Image (tube, grey):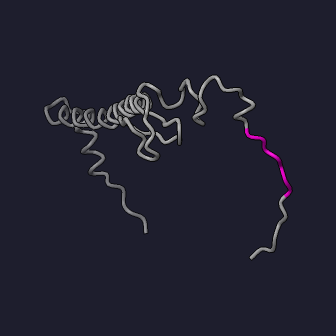
Amino acid sequence: MSRPVPWLWIVLAGLLLLAPGLVGRLFVDVLEGITLLVVVVPLVLAGGGVIAWWWLRRNLITCTACGTASLGQSQCPACGAPLQSGQGSVSSGSSSAGAPLGVDASDVTIDVVAQPVEEGGKR
């Protein structure tokens, strides 16, 4: 069963848009305000989110001992190691494994040997 077309509401909306009176102007202003909210509010929220993300990435400190990231701490909450402020999260000057600078790389490199894995019975 199809619904009848609401011609009365369509004609009323058309008259409000075309009428040069106060009611027509009010109707158009309300539509402009709703459109402005629908367009501008997501853009402002996205901009605020980007700024918050940059601030958070700048203030995160990564522990050189265990790799846990924390915000505004002087001591690592996971392992208790002292944290260096201004270290940054991604681009730190020291290695993430905690090896001191000036050590020969061959002494701290881990040799990995590949071994075949036997597949057992599936359960």
Reply yes or no: does residue 17 show up in magenta: no
Tell me which secondary structure the magenta stretch mostly adopts: loop
In the figure, 50 relative to 115: above or below?
above
The residue most toward the bottom is 123
State left or right for residue 63 relative to residue 51.
right
> x and y percent of residue 55 in the render?
38, 29
Q: Looking at the image, which residue is at 32% across and 35% down?
A: 41
**Which quadrant of the view contains residue 23?**
top left
Q: Looking at the image, which residue is at 20% across and 33% down?
A: 19
> x and y percent of residue 2 in the render?
42, 65
Reply yes or no: does residue 113 show up in magenta: yes
Q: Nearer the viewer, residue 102 or 46?
A: 102
Q: Nearer the viewer, residue 12 or 107?
A: 107
The mark total stands at: 0
Q: Nearer the viewer, residue 69 or 20?
A: 69
State left or right for residue 118 relative to residue 18.
right
> x and y percent of residue 68 in the render?
49, 42
> Split into 4 quadrants, where in the image is the N terminus?
bottom left
Q: Looking at the image, which residue is at 29% across and 35% down?
A: 37
Q: Nearer the viewer, residue 76 or 30?
A: 76
In the figure, 64 relative to 77: above or below?
above
**Which quadrant of the view contains residue 20?**
top left
State left or right for residue 87 relative to residue 45.
right
Magenta range is 110-116
> Split into 4 quadrants, where in the image is the C terminus?
bottom right
